[in-house]
Structure formats: C-alpha cells, structure tokens
Image (tube, helix red, strand yellow):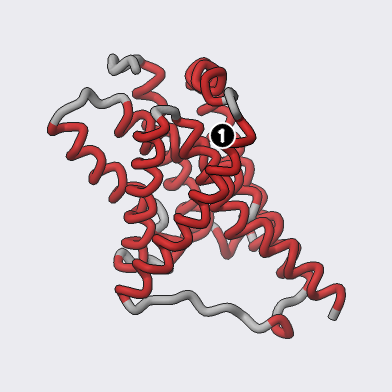
C-alpha cells in the first residue's frame, strides 16, 4: 500500500470534523429555530455531501481495492457477517465490564411519527462506514508506514473513532469507550484483510443491524400490534 500522503488524503481528514461541527451547530445551537424534522433533513444532506466528497476523493482507492476484494466475494461477505456478530460480542463484553447498558423504549410508547423519524435517521449510519473507515482505518492506520508510529496510530485512530460518537451518548466520554474497542476491532479486520472493504462491509452490516433493520422491525411490530 502506498504510504505517501497526497492533497486528497489531507482533504479527506477534514470531512468528518466538518460534518461533526455542522451537526453540533444544527442540534445544539439552531435546533429550536429549525425544529426536529428540518434539522434531521439538513443533517442527512450534510452527511450525504460528506459521503459524496469521500467517494470523489478516494473513489480510485475503493475501486482498486474492491477489484481485489471481489474475488470469492460471497465467501468474504459471509465472513463479514460473522465478524459483525463478533463486533456485537466485543461491544456487549466491553459494556458488561464497564457496567453500562442502553435502555430500550417500550413499543407502546413509540408513535408512527417517531418510527418514521427513526427510519430517516438510520440512513446516516448506512453512509457513515465509508467516511469513517476511509478516515480512521485507511488514512490514520493503513497508510502509516510499518513501525512504532503505526502501532501508536492503531490506538489513536481507535480512540478518535470512539470519540466521534460522543454526542450519541449525551456527551459522555465513558460511554464512547466500547466504541473505541470496536474501532480497534475494525482496525484489526482491515489489517488482516489488507483491504479497506473488509472493515467497510463489517461496519456497514454492524450499523445496518444496529439502526435501519431495528427501525423497520419496530414499524412492522407496530403495524401488527
């Protein structure tokens, strides 16, 4: 893998920080003026633009690595699904050690309006793996030359990955620690596959089963009930 940095690589590092800054401004500063629906739409547009920018900057990288990854693709996808279950195991185990958990709302308290908002909001996590894997696993880990610095960046990139979920847990750094461990897990997947698509697919399946699929299942359960 080419470890020389280009202007595109440096620009790529700015995408997630800019996304997060705009998202914070939308939900922490202008939310009461915009309302939840408009804020959600603007946020989706911003992350959609970030997704497109990352594809523009790293499309050639993704294409070249997918050309290698598509050999025995179905077998690799099955492995990615198994690794997704492993990610949940890592997350559950870490939360168990820390004594933390997430509370679910009872089905009766969930309205159709809130379900449609959940489904709309779950689109962002489906886009996130591309920008996050390219940033934390490709730029901040795989492109680093082998040696002590690469080992350091394994931990640094995993910590930063956890920290970008800071606002997902109402500003609790402690609650982001399990995601730091998951970030290290994704980095190991990328390292052993020697291909960014290994962690992208695993991360995509992880987010889909953590956001989009549950929202759809809740909607179906609500319709049935």
Report whether residue 165 is seen.
yes
Residue at image point 37% right, 49% down = 185
With respect to residue 202, does 87 lie above or below? below
Tally of numbered tags: 1
Residue at image point 43% right, 39% down = 16
Q: Nearer the viewer, residue 127 or 183?
A: 183
Query: In the image, residue 23 lies at what x, y percent?
Result: 50, 50
Furthest residue toward left: 148
With respect to residue 133, does 1 lie above or below? above
Per the image, label 1 sits on a secondary structure element best described as: helix
Q: Quadrant of the C terminus?
A: bottom right
Q: Nearer the viewer, residue 90 or 128?
A: 90
With respect to residue 193, does 32 lie above or below? below
Query: In the image, residue 101 lies at what x, y percent?
Result: 43, 76
Query: In which image quadrant can residue 75 be found?
Result: top right
Query: In the image, residue 152 lies at what x, y percent?
Result: 18, 39
Residue at image point 28% right, 14% down = 4
With respect to residue 34, does 186 lie above or below? above
Q: Quadrant of the N terminus?
A: top left
Q: Nearer the viewer, residue 198 or 217?
A: 198
Query: Is 71 on the left or on the right of 5, as rendered?
Result: right
Query: In the image, residue 220 lies at what x, y percent?
Result: 81, 68
Query: In which image quadrant can residue 17 be found?
Result: top left
Mark 1 highlights which residue?
A: 51
Report whether residue 56 is seen.
no
Query: In which image quadrant can residue 171 be found?
Result: bottom left
Query: Is 66 on the left or on the right of 134, as rendered?
Result: right
Query: Is 65 on the left or on the right of 5, as rendered?
Result: right
């Amino acid at each position: 893998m080419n470890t020389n940095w280009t202007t595109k690589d440096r620009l790529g590092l700015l995408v997630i920080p800019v996304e997060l800054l705009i998202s914070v401004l939308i939900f922490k500063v202008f939310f009461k003026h915009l309302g939840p629906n408009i804020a959600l739409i603007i946020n989706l547009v911003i992350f959609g633009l970030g997704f497109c920018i990352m594809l523009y900057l790293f499309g050639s990288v993704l294409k070249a690595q997918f050309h290698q990854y598509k050999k025995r693709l179905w077998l690799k996808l099955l492995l990615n699904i198994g690794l997704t279950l492993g990610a949940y195991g890592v997350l559950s185990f870490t939360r168990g050690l820390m004594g933390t958990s997430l509370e679910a709302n009872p089905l009766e308290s969930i309205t159709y309006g809130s379900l449609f908002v959940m489904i709309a909001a779950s689109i962002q996590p489906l886009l996130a793996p591309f920008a996050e894997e390219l940033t934390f696993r490709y730029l901040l880990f795989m492109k680093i030359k082998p040696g002590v610095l690469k080992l350091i960046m394994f931990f640094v990139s995993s910590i930063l990955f956890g920290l970008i979920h800071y606002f997902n847990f109402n500003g609790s750094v402690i609650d982001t620690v399990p995601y730091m461990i998951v970030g290290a897990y994704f980095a190991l997947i990328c390292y052993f596959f020697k291909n960014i698509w290994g962690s992208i697919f695993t991360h995509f399946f992880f987010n889909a089963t953590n956001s989009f699929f549950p929202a759809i299942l809740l909607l179906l359960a609500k319709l049935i009930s």
